[in-house]
Image (cartoon, rainbow, N blue to C red):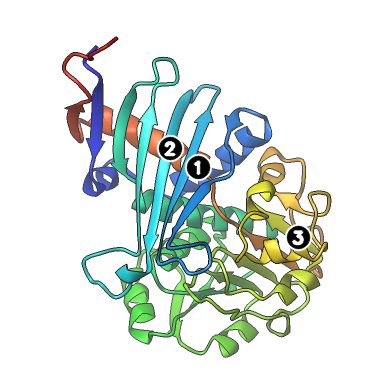
């Protein structure tokens, strides 16, 4: 066998339709539905931190999974970040790659850039949280962080909540927030207001979404009013007090969330305030076995860590699109395999 592998660079992935947030939202919700139905094998990610767990400057996450049903695809994402890349104009902070494999022959069939796939599926999860838990008739949201995920989160919130009228986009660097606001002019019928004062912005909105690189909490319980929804897509910017005060806590994947020591959910679990019995996983929303928000006066906290099946679901769609469109470069694992 020729062992053909379709190589897709980042530009190819974009050409194959990745930046369609409607598609990303639908694919992500389908992933959680299939996960809930038992059609997906997805173990918690394994992380290698350098030089060690507490003082890392780089990490490498191994994220394998299998998606069954009509998808029938195996794959792995190699997700990597380096703090030294911050501030370098020619390097992203996170650099991810994805391999897809045929589950029957185990041959690799595609290798592609996964960095933008990560950005799209991360915010798609935030959009799903918002769809099910945002206050009814929510018109105004604050997004903390105007980086890569800030960009895709604008897309996700606008698609998931068609009634949204204004987004306060808050970042320490006003120019970054202004740049994103300018980028989305005319794309959505939503006013995007750049700002730097997080305290002031948080007081104005009933939907709060965080995607910063902060190592200290920014959102505390006193920022959150009764009936608000807080969606934490990053690691350390939401204080434990927010989770403690919430009437409902939603997570994407409980058993993985409680392994990450710097996540709010881990802290709540360690305190004994959060167990598998009193948390709601996204799979229950996608399957329709839980309604999400139950009343307008309850305060909701949502947190995500992401899991491989989201990446593989989007990657296999991109692979199929690229094949049909003639996009990408075909490479070979071997000409003739030795020692078979």
Q: Earlier in the sequence, mark 3 or mark 1?
A: 3
The answer to whether residue 27 is visible is no
Cα distance, mark 1 to mark 2? 7 Å
Vertical position of residue 41 compared to residue 129: above or below: above
Residue 328: quarter of image: top left
Q: Which residue is mark 3?
A: 269
Vertical position of residue 16 compared to residue 261: above or below: above
Cα distance, mark 3 to mark 2? 28 Å
Badge 3 marks a residue whose secondary structure is helix
The residue shown at (31%, 26%) is 109
Cα distance, mark 3 to mark 1? 23 Å
Q: Are marks 1 and 2 in contact (CB under 8 Å)?
A: yes
Residue 44: quarter of image: top right
The answer to whether residue 102 is visible is yes
The spot of residue 73 in percent (x, y) is 45, 26
Residue 97: quarter of image: top left
Q: Viewer-proximal residue, 144 or 183?
A: 144
Q: Earlier in the sequence, mark 3 or mark 2?
A: 2
Q: Which residue is mark 1?
A: 308
Q: Is residue 311 left or right of residue 340?
A: right
The spot of residue 327 in percent (x, y) is 20, 35
Q: Is residue 113 left or right of residue 283?
A: left
The residue shown at (77%, 41%) is 289
Badge 2 marks a residue whose secondary structure is strand
The spot of residue 110 in percent (x, y) is 30, 31
The residue shown at (66%, 75%) is 206
- The quarter of the picture where the N terminus appears is top left
Q: Which residue is mark 2?
A: 76
The residue shown at (62%, 56%) is 129
- The quarter of the picture where the C terminus appears is top left
Nearest to the eye among marks 3 and 1: give it: 3
């Amino acid at each position: 066998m020729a062992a053909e592998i379709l190589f897709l660079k980042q530009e190819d992935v974009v050409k194959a339709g990745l930046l369609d947030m409607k598609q990303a939202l639908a694919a992500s919700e389908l992933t959680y539905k299939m996960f809930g139905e038992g059609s997906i094998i997805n173990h918690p990610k394994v992380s290698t931190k350098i030089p060690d767990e507490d003082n890392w400057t780089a990490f490498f996450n191994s994220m394998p999974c299998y998606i069954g049903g009509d998808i029938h695809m195996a794959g792995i994402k190699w997700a990597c970040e380096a703090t030294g890349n911050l501030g370098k104009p020619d390097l992203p902070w996170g650099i991810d790659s994805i391999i897809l494999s045929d589950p029957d022959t185990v041959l690799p069939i595609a290798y592609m850039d996964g960095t933008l796939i990560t950005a799209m599926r991360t915010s798609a999860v935030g959009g799903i949280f918002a769809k099910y838990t945002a206050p009814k008739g929510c018109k105004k949201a604050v997004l903390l962080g105007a980086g890569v995920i800030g960009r895709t989160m604008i897309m996700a919130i606008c698609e998931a909540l068609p009634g949204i009228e204004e987004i306060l986009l808050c970042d320490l660097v006003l120019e970054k927030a202004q740049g994103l606001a300018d980028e989305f002019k005319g794309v959505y019928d939503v006013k995007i207001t750049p700002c730097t004062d997080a305290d002031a912005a948080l007081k104005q909105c009933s939907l709060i979404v965080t995607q910063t690189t902060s190592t200290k909490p920014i959102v505390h319980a006193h920022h959150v009013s009764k009936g608000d929804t807080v969606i934490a897509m990053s690691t350390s910017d939401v204080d434990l007090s927010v989770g403690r005060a919430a009437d409902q806590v939603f997570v994407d994947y409980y058993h993985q969330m409680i392994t990450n020591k710097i996540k709010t959910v881990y802290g709540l679990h360690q305190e004994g305030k959060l167990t598998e019995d009193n948390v709601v996983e996204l799979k229950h929303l996608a399957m329709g076995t839980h309604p999400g928000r139950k009343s307008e006066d309850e305060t909701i906290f949502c947190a995500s860590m992401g899991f491989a099946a989201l990446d593989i679901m989007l990657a296999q769609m991109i692979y199929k699109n690229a094949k049909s469109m003639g996009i990408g470069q075909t490479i070979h694992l071997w000409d003739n395999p030795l020692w078979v």
